[in-house]
Amino acid sequence: MRALITGASGFVGSHVLQNLLNVHFEVRALVRSKAARDQLANWGIEVVYGDLATGAGLEDACNGVDVVFHVGAMYSLERRYETAMYEVNVFGTRRLLQAILRTPSIQRLVYTSSTAAVGLLPDGEPSDESVEIDPYDALPGYKRSKVLAEWEVRAAVRQGLDAVIVNPSTPVGSGDIKPTPTGMMIRDAVLGRMPAYVDTGLNWVAVSDVAVGHLLALEKGKCGERYILGNVNMTFRDLLERIAGLREMPVPRVRLPLSVALGAAYLDELILSRISGRAPRAPIAGVQLARHPMFYSSARAVTELGLPQTPIEVALEEAIEWFTAAARRR
């Protein structure tokens, strides 16, 4: 079977790619940049050019494949990238869906959404796939773009596309090259660069389980449905304590009040980062999201798909080793 994958050079995408190769798929990867092409050069796969933001190359990329894994997305919590995220995550998904609908050979799409597109319960209890969110109640930027992108996929399902949606929570593990915003937090904690923190609640999952979940969704997922790919709900303080326990290091002592952290985030993102040219260490949206615990239940994916639940300590150990080795190489 031949699969097209977008986002294969990214954190989750690279793990999905590895799993596809493990089960002997022929893989074609869509890339937009030379850096992504170079990163995939030694994987033994077909690499083709395409751009979700313009639609260039999407028709040719879809030609002759049996299934599509649309993992690619623009992920940032910085305000300056809001417009670009809508162009890639929403309209780019629409462009790809249109190309898929025009390709008779394609049997199924697995679309990588996010728990950002799942609503939260007011009492802080873990929410599930049934909890919807109005995109215009969602925080502008990445979160809203993922809600709107899911709407695009559901519209395509109504047009006859066989598609399954997966919603990873917060993946942890090796290979977070960029890194993602949550990967940056883990990296900074591991390298002792986190003097203070803002506590919040997140659902954490091994990135290897997320990758397996994509293939399980292809095989067992119900058309038009979504599945949360997650594992354990923990506060950020709990996560820091587990990292400290794995490496016998101190936990950051200073817990910043949300109001103080938000003020610092505005200063950092709107002024300091623009002067220095670096990315803000604490984007405004990241602090705003910390207001409410983001707890989710992956019971449906475990029951219906057979999603594995690797202990989070195993995934953290892989992430720690990877970030430590990456720091040594620099």
Image: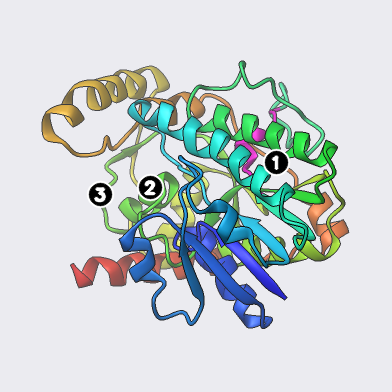
Q: In this view, does 125 lie above or below 232?
A: above
* Residue 123, magenta (yes or no): no
Instruction: Work out whether residue 229 can be spotted.
Output: no
Tell me the SS state at disc 3: loop
313 lies left or right of 178: right
Q: Specify start and end residues of the magenta stretch as a single range.
A: 112-120
Query: Residue 241, how many percent across, how many down?
Result: 46, 52
Compare marks 3 and 2 and give the one earlier in the sequence. Answer: 2
Q: How crowded is mark 1: few (under 14 residues within 10 Å), some or many (20 or more)?
A: many
Tell me the SS state at disc 2: helix
Q: Distance between the residues labelled 3 and 2?
A: 9 Å
Compare marks 1 and 3 and give the one earlier in the sequence. Answer: 3
Instruction: Work out whether residue 117 can be spotted.
Output: yes
Q: How far apart are marks 1 and 3 (CA)?
A: 29 Å
Residue 296 shows which numbered tag? Answer: 1
Residue at 71% from the left image edge and 63% from the top image edge: 67
* Quarter placement of the C terminus: bottom left
Residue at 56% from the left image edge and 69% from the top image edge: 28
* Quarter placement of the N terminus: bottom right
Query: Residue 83, how many percent across, how many down?
Result: 42, 27
Query: Residue 301, how many percent across, how many down?
Result: 79, 54
- Residue type beneath disc 1: Tyr
Q: Quadrant of residue 37?
A: bottom left
Q: Name the residue under label 2.
A: 185
Q: Name the residue under label 3.
A: 193
Query: Are the two marked residues, 1 and 2, in contact with CB atoms closer than 8 angstroms?
Result: no
Q: Which of 225 and 30 is in front in this view?
A: 30
211 lies left or right of 41: right
